[in-house]
Image (cartoon, rainbow, N blue to C red):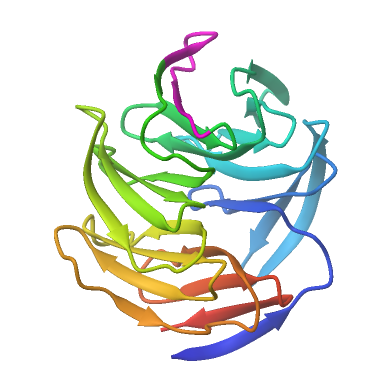
Amino acid sequence: MVFSTLISTSTVEGTSQENKSSIMLTGDNNGSVILFNNNLSEFNYKTKIHLHNQSITDLSFSINGNVFASASEDKSVKVYDLEKEKELLCYSEHNSDVKSVDWAKPRSLLVSSGKDKKIRFFDPREKKSIATLSNVHFDIINKVRFNSNSNWFITASKEHNLKLVDFRMLRVLQKFDSHSLGVNSVVWNPLNNLAFCSVGEDKKIIFWHVGSEECHCIDNGHEKEIFDVCYNNFGNVLATGSKDSTIKFWN
């Protein structure tokens, strides 16, 4: 059930929030990261950091909340330290737009995916990727997300499906088919390592459970393509952002 809708007139390419320090990041189509402080119910502008030459597609905080990673259409993944106010690392191994980046927080590793259909893993102590998967999808991988213990990650692809991968064996465990068009984003329920939600070009919001072939689908959740999805910290409220310039909240 949708209980609230917000209307936006600006282009927001990616967001991430750090709960410990109450900082929210947004990335724009000019390659800049904008920082906001969360003051009770309001987000107040703090500063802007220009990191990339093209649109920022995704953002993710490290486990300590002082460092974040950014993905961009300029084919790079960057790591930035907020306390030191400096760029720490730049990975440029993707040969096309990088669509997603995520921290495997207990392991302090990074995973990225992109238009080149590859999934790359980075150790911030190294200056290059430590592993690459190139056979998970045959089309663009729009999103990759680790679950909370970082043993599994889920991928969302333009080939109309999602796949669950075991990070320890780098092997696909399960495929999820119910989207009729490309899958744009996916998010794990923060309180359930087996539950996740996906959205896509078909305007569907689909709730899944690992190990089950059944799913719960909300058809036409928006009037147009749904770009992104996220849960609140308690896993009982879902937010979806769409090409129809609205953000909807569901419970």
Image: 142 above or below 241: above
Image side of residue 170 versus residue 131, left or right: left
**129 is within the stretch colored magenta:** yes
Out of 99 and 19, give the one closest to the viewer: 99
Corner quadrant of residue 54: top right
The C terminus sits in image quarter: bottom left
Corner quadrant of residue 68: top right
Q: Residue at x 83, y 65 (%)?
A: 10
Q: Residue furthest left?
A: 211
Residue 63 seen anywhere in this rendered image of the structure: no
**Residue 70: x, y in percent?**
63, 35
Out of 103 and 170, give the one closest to the viewer: 170
Total number of numbered discs in the rendering: 0
Q: Residue at x 24, y 61 (%)?
A: 192
The N terminus sits in image quarter: bottom left
Out of 19 and 50, give the one closest to the viewer: 50
**Residue 57: x, y in percent?**
66, 45
Image side of residue 208 versus residue 185, left or right: left
Image side of residue 61 versus residue 103, left or right: right
Q: Residue at x 42, y 67 (%)?
A: 179
Out of 207 and 24, give the one closest to the viewer: 207
Image: 176 above or below 90: below
**121 is within the stretch colored magenta:** yes
**Residue 214: x, y in percent?**
20, 72
Corner quadrant of residue 37: bottom right
User: Magenta residues?
Assistant: 117-130
Residue 155 seen anywhere in this rendered image of the structure: yes
Q: Residue at x 64, y 18 (%)?
A: 92
